[in-house]
Image (cartoon, rainbow, N blue to C red):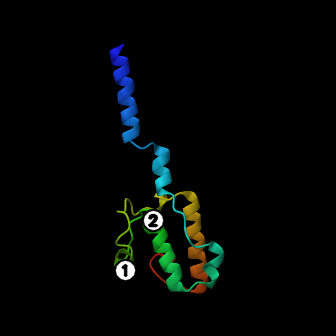
C-alpha cells in the first residue's frame, strides 16, 4: 500500500513539472495584434515587421540579420520550419504574404 501512495504522489509531481502537450501547443499559439483587414492599408515595411513579429512570437528562427536584430529580445527560436506554427497562424501569414505580394513588396520571406 505505501508503494501505491508513493507512485501516486510521484505521478502528481511529474504531471506538475512536465507541461502537457496541450499546454505546449498553446504556448506556441500566436495571437497577432494586427487585424488582417488592415493589411491593405499597411506599407511593405509594416507588413514585413508584422510577419517577423509573428514568426518570432511563434519561436520560428528568423532568417535575416535585420529580423534577428529587430526581435533580439524574443524567446529563443526552436525551429526554422514554420510547420511548428498552428494552422491559423500559418493561414494568417499566408494572407499577409499574399497582400504583400499584391502590393509588390519584396523580401526573403514575403514571397
Q: Residue under label 2, please give it.
A: 57
Nearer to us: label 2 or label 1: 2
Residue 92, given in percent of the width and then of the height, sits at: 58, 67
The residue positioned farthest toward the top in the image shown? 1
Query: Could you tell me which secondary element the residue under label 1 belongs to?
Result: helix
**Residue at image coords 35%, 70%:** 73
**Residue at image coords 49%, 59%:** 85
Compare marks 2 and 1 and give the one earlier in the sequence: 2
With respect to residue 90, does 100 lie above or below?
below
Query: Could you tell me which secondary element the residue under label 2 belongs to?
Result: helix
Q: Which label belongs to residue 66?
A: 1
Identify which residue, 33 or 60, lies in the foreground: 33
The residue positioned farthest toward the right in the image shown? 37
Residue 99, given in percent of the width and then of the height, sits at: 61, 78
**Residue at image coords 52%, 82%:** 46
- Please tell me how crowded label 2 is: few (under 14), some (14-19), or many (20+) other residues with Cα within 10 Å: many
With respect to residue 104, does 29 lie above or below?
above
Residue 33, given in percent of the width and then of the height, sits at: 55, 70
Amino acid at each position: 500500500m505505501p508503494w501505491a501512495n508513493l507512485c501516486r504522489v510521484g505521478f502528481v509531481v511529474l504531471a506538475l513539472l512536465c507541461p502537457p502537450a496541450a499546454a505546449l501547443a498553446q504556448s506556441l499559439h500566436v495571437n497577432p495584434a494586427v487585424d488582417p483587414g488592415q493589411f491593405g492599408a499597411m506599407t511593405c515595411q509594416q507588413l514585413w515587421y508584422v510577419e517577423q513579429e509573428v514568426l518570432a512570437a511563434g519561436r520560428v528562427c528568423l532568417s535575416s540579420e535585420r529580423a534577428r536584430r529587430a526581435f533580439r529580445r524574443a524567446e529563443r527560436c526552436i525551429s526554422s520550419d514554420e510547420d511548428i506554427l498552428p494552422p491559423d497562424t500559418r493561414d494568417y501569414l499566408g494572407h499577409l504574404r499574399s497582400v504583400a505580394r499584391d502590393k509588390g513588396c519584396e523580401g526573403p520571406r514575403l514571397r
